[in-house]
Each structure stands twice: as C-alpha cells, then as structure tokens.
Amino acid sequence: MSSLEFRNLTVTFGRGEKTVVAVDAVSLVVPDRTVVGLVGESGSGKSTLARAAVGLVDARSGDILVDGQPATTGRRRRGGLQMVFQDPYSSLDPRMSIGASIAEALPSDVRRAERRGAVAELLEQVGLDPLLAPRMPSGLSGGQRQRIALARALAAEPAVLIADEITSALDVSVQGQVLNLLREVQRGLAMSVLFISHNLATVCYLSDIVAVMERGRIVEIGPTEQIVADPQHPYTRELLESAPRLGEKIDPEQLAVPD
Amino acid sequence: MSTTDIAEKMVDRAAARAGTGRGGLLRRLATSPLGMAALLVDLLLLLLVVFGPMIWGAAAEEFDVDNMNSPPTDGHLFGTDSLGRDILLRVLVATRLSIGLALGATAIGAVIGLLLGAIPAVAGPRVGRAVVAVVNVAVAFPGLLLALFFASIFGASPSGAMLALGVAFAPGFARLTQTLTAGVVGRDYVSAARVIGVGRLRIIGRHLLPNVADTLVVNISLSAGGALLAFAGLSFLGLGVQAPSYDWGRMLFDGLDGIYVNPAAALAPGLAIVLAGLALNLTGEVGAQLVGRRVGSARLPAKPATGAATSVADGPDGSPGADDLVLDLRGLTVSFPRGRGEKSVPVRGVDLRIARGEAVGILGESGSGKSLTAMSVARLVPDPARVDVQSLTFEGRDLSANTSRELRRMLGTTMSVVFQDLMSSFNPVMKVGRQLAEVATEHQGIGRRAALDRAIGRLRSVSISRAEQRALQYPHELSGGMRQRAMIAMGLMGSPTLLIADEPTTALDATVQRRVLQLIAGVRAAEQSALLLISHDVAVVAAMCDRILVMYAGRVVEDIPVDDLLAGPRHPYSRALLAAVPTIQTDRSQSLRTIEGRPPQPADYPIGCAFAERCAFASEKCQQDPVLEPIDNGSVACWHPQQGPVPGVVIDSPAVVSRQRATTATAGPVMPSHEPSRTRERGR
C-alpha cells in the first residue's frame, strides 16, 4: 500500500497585503498503484503543490499524508516521497559523477560494498548502460539526464513518485522515450505517481485519474476517459479545446487592423 | 531555443573541447605566453621560498663591519644595511616569510569567508539574514583599516598581523561566496539533494562549494597579491614582523632610514614586493582566463558572405515564377568557429523558397538548424557565426551582398520577426508604446505622435485591453501572454510581406498559444503576408502552414504540403516525429512510438544520411548523401521513402482521413514499432 493524500493544503507566499495564495485548500488523493495527472497552466499552483509535498516549500496549513502518516522525504526512511524535476540540465550536480549522484540517494543502510551494484541496477532499470556511472553529466543528452534523475529518485525507494513537468525540456523524439520509461517503471514497481504537466495530452496519455488545477484550486477531477469525453468545468473544456490536435486548422480571428 | 542560446551553447562546447581536463589545462597554460610567464615566475618564487633560507640564510646574517650602510658595490649588489649585511641576500631569504605570511593571511580570510558566506544558503531564513547583515556591515569597512584595528588587538607580531589581515579579508570572501552560492542554491540539483535528505554541511561541501570553486580560487589567488602588499604595509608601519626577523616590509622600514646614504636598501625589498605581487596577480589572471571559458581567437566575420557567384537570373525550376516569390534562398550554410581552424556547420546547404502569401513551416528538433535558417533570412545570426549563401533574394532584391541603409529600411518595413524569447526581445527600460512607435518612426518616417497613435491601435488589434495605459508601461509590467501579443503587434507596425515567427508559442500555455496562433493567422489574412513559422511541434506547424520543411541535422529532409504530411509523409524521420508526440486522441493502452537514440550534434554529423543510425529502414546505401528529389507534390531526401498513413496517429481532418483510406490499399511497409527497453522488476 502506498498512497499520497493532500488534505486541505494551503500554501501562501509573502505577507500582509501582498500575500499570494498559491495553493488554496487543496485536497487530492493519489491512490495506491495509480497515476494521477495534475494539469494546469503556469501559475496555477501545481508545481508549488509538488514542492510542498517534498518539503521544499512550507505549507501554511493542511496535511500531506503518505499511507495516512505525515509525509517524509530523504533516504533515512524508505517509503517517503521523491521528486523528478523539470530541467534535467539543472537537476544533476555538474561536479558529481552520475554514479555518485545516484548513490547519494540510496538508503543510508545500504552497505558500501553493495552501493556500486545498486547503482548499476538502477541505471539498467532506466535503460542506461551501467558503465555510465563514473561519467560526469556534462556529455549527456537531456533524455539521458532525465533517466538518471529518475534513477536517483527511485534509489531512495519512495512510496510515491512526483514527476514535475519531466518532459517539458526534452526534444520531441526523446519525450516519448521518457514517457514510456516512466510508464514501464510505474507498472513494474507498482508505484503511485503524481504526474504534473501543463500538457494535457501527455497527462491524459499517462494518467488513470486527471485533476485540473486553476488558480490554486482543483476545479475538476475524474477518470481520464471521463475528463476527456465529458468535461464539466468550463476551464477543463477550454483546456481540451486548446490542446493541439493534428490536422486541425487555426481559424484566423477576425482582426480589425486599424490604420 | 533562441539563436543566441544556440550560439552560446556552441561556444561552450567549443571551449569544452579546447580542453577542460587537467592535462588540457596545463597544456593550455604552457602554450599561452601569459600562462608561461606566470608558471615560470611561480616556479622561481617556489624555489626561493623552499631553498632561499637554506642556501643564503647564514650568509644573510653575516656582519661586514667594514661595509656598513654601503652603497652598491661589486661584493654587495644592492649594498648593505646598518650592520653591514648584504641587502640582496636578505631580500632573497625574506621571500619565504613574506610570501608565507601573505598566503597564510589569505588562507585564513578564505576559510572564514567561505564558512560565513555559505551559511545563508543552507541556514534558516532568520540566521541567514543575520549573517548577511553582519557581512554587509563588515564589507563596508576599508580592509586596511580593519587590518590595523585587528593588528592592534592581536598585538604587533607576525602571527598577530597574519590573523588581523586574514580577518580583514574575510568579509570580502564571505560576500563573494554568498553571491556565488546564491546562484547555485536555487538550482534543482540542490533541491534534489534536499529531497533525498542530504545534510546541510554535506550540501555545502558536495554541492555548493565545488560548483563555485573556480571563481573562488581565482579570486583567492588574486587576493594573495593584495595580501602581500598589505602585509608589507603592516610591517612597514611596525605592526607586522619585528626584528630580528625580517620580511620585505620590515626591510623597507629599515632601508628607509638610510635612503639618502643607500637608496638601494629600500629599493630592493620594494622591487621584490612589486615583482612577487605581480606574479601572484598574474597567476590569478591566468586562472581567471582558463576558468572564464574563453573562445579561441579564430573569429570569423559575421557578415553574410556570398559563395561562388551564382546568378539569380537562373530562375526557379518549375514552381512559382521569380516574381511570385517573396523569398528565394539557395545554398544556405551557417558555421561556427571551434578554434584551431575547425568549425562546426549546423546548417548545411538549405534552399528555401516562399511564394507571396504562402505559409511555410520549418519543423525540427533542437539543433536541427531551423532557428539559424530563419535568423539567416532575417540577417540576425549571432556574432561568431559565419553565414554563406549562394543567393538570397527578398522581394526581388539581392540581399546577399547589400548592406546599405536603404536595404535596412526596406527590411524593416517588409519583413518582421517574432522572437521566441519574450523578455530579451523588448528593451526592458523603454516603454512598450515607444518601442512599437520606433518601428514606424525609424522605417516609415512618421512623426512621433502619429507613430504612438498607430502603436496603440496595433496593441488594441492584438486584443490588449486598455491599450493606452499599456503603451505607457514597461515590458516587465505586462504578463507573458500580453508581451507575446505586443511583440506580434510590433511585427505589425509595418505591412510585412514576410512574417517570420521563431517558436512563437513554445513558452506559452495551451490557451494562450491558441490565441497567439489565431492572431498570427489573422495578421496574415489582413496583410496578405507570407509566413515562415519555425516550430518543434507538428501540430502547430500543421495548423498554421500550407507547406512544411522537415529539417534534420542541418538539412531539409522533406518538403511537403501539409495535407500530404498528415496523410503520411515519405521520410522515415517525418513519420517517426508524427508518431512520437502524444495528442489527446492517442491510444493510452499502447506504448508511444519512439525514435531511439538522439539527433547528432553539428560536430558529429556523419557522412551520408544523418538519420540512418536511428532509422529502421537504413541500408548500406544510406552511407551516401541523399539528395532532395521531387516526389508527389513535394520532395524528400531519402533512399528508402515510405508511404501510407503513419500507424497510431489520429488525424482530426475528414479530408485527410478519407485520403488516407484511399491510399491504404496501395500502402507499402509501415514503420515498425521499436520495442521499448525492458524494465526489470527491482529486488527489494
């Protein structure tokens, strides 16, 4: 069993009159072995929600629970939360070898002698050659880096994985590789995943349940098929209409161009 | 990706190739004259520090009672001091103490500074703020004043002075460390380390300091020169080294007494201080140069240069007549110098023809050369690049050689460019309205008042509310979507016959993207402009364009009408691109089709078809360069062109779908699916 639950979570930035409510009393459940997609546009608060879950941002009120217990991160305890970040060029320390980056995330009770083997296994799991371990990240492509970031998150043996816009910075032909990999890993390990993206198409492709976030609130949530086929909230409908479809022509808007 | 990014990355890569490994670093040091000099002087100083006192230590203490305060003679090159000791020998012996104390003080300052400076990055906000405040106050004091203050506290001894100087240097280092780590601490790998549960000290030691070390080391070695001077100053003031010990400052102090009898006694230690100070600074400078990723000196001119003079009058082959073409570009090559006479060529012989009113899309991934192609047309290729064309004709005029003012003016009114990078496209310190108006005053000679009125009108036409007020605001006061629309409004200030849009919607949300695309389409409809749209997104180019050029590894691999592309393109790469991107309609139960591997970098373009190593249809033949050959309504550069609809791709266009049905009957082999790499269950 591993589930993630946000209960009435509120995150604010600033003080006094300048307070911005980034996440507004959000309640959301990522059930066991399920991929929940969180979609919304920039500024909707989806990334803040993720950062609050892993403790990079402090919540103002509300609870974040893993299997009913307050969430933990880190390698001291297995079964916490881990996150894969958006920009693979910034999420790996340029001065640390790939192997060292992954090894750093291994649970602290993994013995020194076993670490090398564990790293090799993780690299294989994300479809990379274990011989890459001593290399520095500088020569690697975005797709390879994102695989390593995923391996690092998996190293900590999390109960729930949070993937925050993990394909946005990748090339089109590489995006698919990473999405497929995440799907395989999720199924293979029977993991729960919170998949965050502004791209409705990738969210729908990967998720069992889709939650739509707008201005800090979740405005609609439901099984993916239902959201796509029968959206209830106007914002969901707008997102669906705006999502690019192959073969559809853009209508030039009637523009009065005054001279 | 904007062109400047591309240029920067290439420069980075070039620098990286030039040698960042340790061996490469030393080699570079030894081959540059400055590095050579620094290396030599440092070696000399090191020898003096280590062996000086051993060799001359005793001789420097010998009294020559017959020659006290003697001016330079054959026996004593710089004369003697008041006890008849040889000045030159004493200067050489004093090297160890002088340099040692200077380095010691620098080290003390660096360690305290590093610790103080790194605290705010990992401590809580309250402690962090307190430390920053203390450091800020300390930085405000002049260093030498602080040193004097501490020297009087710690007492007039060499170690006291060293400590004093070290403490005085600390705030500067702390401030530097603070600034540098603040840039690193926001990066995702530090966040990732936190999420993993790495402790604070370990974050400082493993993630923060190593990533700012380059700059810090350079600054520390530069400061050592300063410390040397400062220490000499303290000794000279009597606060540093005390007799019978002596360093250069102390000798200066002693020598000054007899300056009229033997000026050399003061001159020699002075000279030593200057030379050693220069050596330390030189070392720092050389270090800074190595760290500062300098590009090789092989800079090529940025101006477009015409290759072999090809007559434009050759006329286009078949397709639209020369008069109907807005743009006729042939044989475009863009190259970047990579040092040592090498160059990388990210665009390799691209032809691009755009008919009047036609919308052409260039589709490609990063590094395919699509942005550089567009920027070459707009003549906006960044500096180290070299642009070569066989011919470039815009609106019937030869642009390849012409750089006159009249031409600039013509370009300003007939060609407009919408950039990808919003913030850098507007001048941040100029009001939006004025920037738009400038286009009209510069290129069309309209008065300022009238131009501003027109600017407000254009802003309104791109659906910017309260246009009068917005025109008086600065770019950062507008939202991203508004800035983008304002950029398009800027493109509208003239009546462009060609609108170039380079990834105009990449950074935008889907709803805003749609709006911006509608606006661009609207502009086209109203002005009858031709459009050159650059994007990595098949759906975007397909929605906007009549014809699409697919680029891969600096070449056009397919040139195809949009409906043919949707119905099923010919080139395996185009087909794979179409299949790789999930849309709302993509079947969730299937794995996504992927293209294994990644696009080659400009430096590693293979001979023959660049896509061959990722292509399921590749054969021996693909080692020869495929040429863009006409096929159906377009052309394709492939030895094994495919046909028929791409499996798994849902097309939202009845016309295309019915065409697909008609052709499926005669379709050849389809793209086989690549088995995605297997994932193993992890043992727990």
Image (spheres, coloured by chain):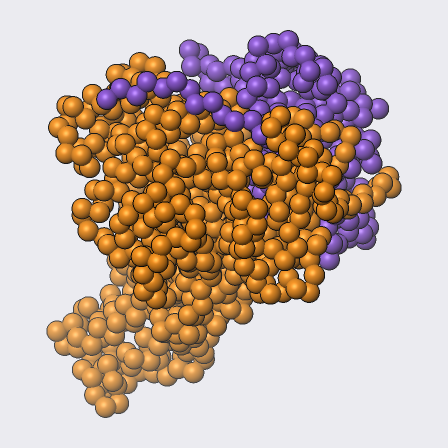
Chain colours: A purple, B orange
Seen at 37% across and 83% down, the residue is: B59
Residue A4 can be seen, yes or no: no
Taking the image as shown, residue B39 lies to the left or right of residue A249, namely: left
Count of numbered circles on the image: 0
> Horizontal and vertical percent for residue B40?
40, 76
Residue pictured at 43% horizontal, 51% vertical = B318
Residue appearing at x 21%, y 88% in the figure: B73
Q: Quadrant of the C terminus of chain B?
A: top right
Q: Position of residue B55 (x, y in %)?
A: 43, 83
Task: Say above or below: A141 vs B357.
Answer: below
- Where in the figure is residue B670, as x and y percent of width and height? 73, 45
The answer to whether residue B633 is seen in the rendering is yes
In the picture as drawn, the residue positioned furthest to the bottom comes out as: B74
Nearest the viewer among B657 and A173 is B657
Quarter assignment of residue A158: top right
Residue B264, above or below B529: below
- Observer-nearest of B633 and B113: B633
Q: Quadrant of residue B46?
A: bottom left
Q: Looking at this view, name the residue that lies furthest to the right.
A: B683
Rendered position, B117 above or below B555: above
Would residue A32 appear left or right of B529 to someone viewing this image?
A: right
Using the image, determine if residue B668 lies above or below residue A64: below
Q: Position of residue A178 (x, y in %)?
A: 68, 40
The residue that appears at 67% across and 26% down in the rendered structure is: B585
